[in-house]
Amino acid sequence: MMNSGGYGIREARDSVQRQNPTAVDLATGCLERIAAENPKLNAYLTIDAEGALESARQSDEQARQGQALPPLAGVPIGIKDVLTMRGMPATAGSRILKSYLPPYDATVVSRLRQAGAVLLGKLNCDEFAMGSSNENSAYGPVRNPAAPDRVPGGSSGGSAAAVAAGMALAALGTDTGGSIRQPASYCGVVGLLPTYGRVSRYGLIAFASSLDRVGPVTRSVRDTAILLGVIAGYDPLDATSSPEPVPDYAAEMEEPAAGLRVGVPGEYFADGLDPEVRQAVERAIDGLRAAGCSILPVSLPHTKYAVPAYYLLATAEASSNLARFDGVRYGYRSPEAGALSAMYRRSRDEGFGPEVKRRILLGTYALSAGYYDAYYKKAQQARTLLARDFLKAFHEVDAIVTPTAPTPAFKLGEKVEDPLAMYLADIYTVPASLAGICGLSVPCGKTAGGLPIGAQVLAGHFQESRALRVARAIEKLAL
């Protein structure tokens, strides 16, 4: 069996150019790995073996003809199931979309195809990307490859688990309040939240439109930089897409971190932070100091409002976005439907899972007459204050380093009955989501029991290269 586990994206592409191993070898190795590991981990919902091998054969034919290959030629990649892929199911982890086959590719999927990527299939996730543990999927939970009795994080748990387990060289996930970064931390991989508008959302099944972002999950910072370079850039099909030029992230990431000012916010190192997580992140910060970075204290005083503001704004937007799933146009329709109003109620009640229903109810309440100003408007004001905190901090420092999550991966079932405890797993990731800035999680150590720990690196709007430079310096410390 050809295992792609030792390859990065660039090495895989170069090996395909040399035809040793071939793209078919790499794809076959991943498909065999999926066959062996997916029954235990449940990371993939749909596998497109035929399509993947056909793409691989095309890359091999180009290589045999001596053509210069595109940047992802022959690279096996998995796609989170909230992104549309022509002719492949797009369930968003929900029963309500079980039979939906989209007729078009998401823009990010089109860009991967154009870059020569081999698309392996669709990855499991929390239903409509709502969750921090990947236990909310209608198709069963994903398990953490590092400890199968523990969660992989959510909502992009399938993406992180697939990459960590060698079932893909890289994957696409989405991040609304931490859904790439937190699973990356729990599974010991790299996951990046791009600046809002940096990567097109066209073809993304919406959860919260002012927060949702698409980003890469990979095994290394360099692979993240390469994949981001492919998917980033303006898209006329997405009204929120930015025309900001796309730099060469892979080249800029290699610039030394020495001389950069790195901020450490006290608010992220308060009570509730696991001691082993604190120790690992502080060790990473000490390593940055030794690498020539200036370490400076910064304050983000409105951090304490981030989780309540997020769970008002995100649920309000979910209430609006998920109104389209009504049993009329596409998706699940209750067979018991009689009158039109009954069909709406039954289809939504039977199609949505408990967490999605909870968030729709919360969001509808926050938007209702008499409560809008008290909840939704107040949360928007808190969001503005959080964004100003970051703007002020980035006048003083180039990047900020924090823990990604307050604890390592927790056990399956541990927080299912306690939504508040589950929501607090996002306490360090939601502030950046609300502010629209970029950030990523990079492995920085393990607990005594072998559970991965991630450090979060945050940077200003469209400063992905700067965040990648700092993350690369942390990555070198862990090697």
Image (cartoon, rainbow, N blue to C red):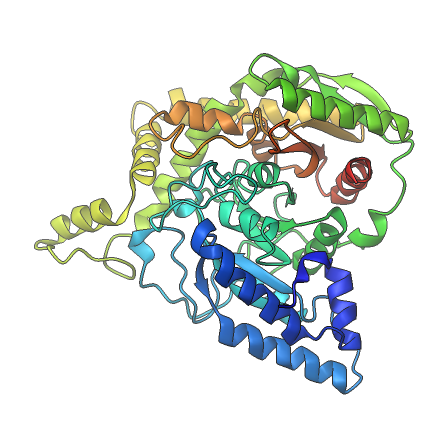
How many callouts does the rendering have? 0
Q: Residue at x 70, y 71 (%)?
A: 73
Question: 242 above or below 117?
Answer: above
- Is the C terminus in the top left, top right, bottom left or bottom right quadrant? top right
- Is the N terminus in the top left, top right, bottom left or bottom right quadrant? bottom right
Give percent across and percent down for residue 397.
Answer: 80, 26
Question: 344 above or below 420?
Answer: below
Task: Describe residue 64's horizontal placement relative to residue 256 as left or right.
Answer: left
Give percent across and percent down for residue 140.
Answer: 36, 47
Task: Describe residue 29's horizontal placement relative to residue 283 as left or right.
Answer: left
* Closer to the camera in the image, 314 or 216: 216
Q: Residue at x 52, y 19 (%)?
A: 305
**Residue 237 in sight in this render:** no
The outermost residue toward the left is 338
Q: Residue at x 45, y 46 (%)?
A: 142
Q: Name which quarter of the figure residue 338 lies in.
A: bottom left
**Residue 354 in sight in this render:** yes
Q: Residue at x 51, y 38 (%)?
A: 153
Give percent across and percent down for residue 375.
Answer: 40, 23
Question: 247 above or below 294?
Answer: below
The outermost residue toward the top is 271
Give percent across and percent down for residue 272.
Answer: 55, 15
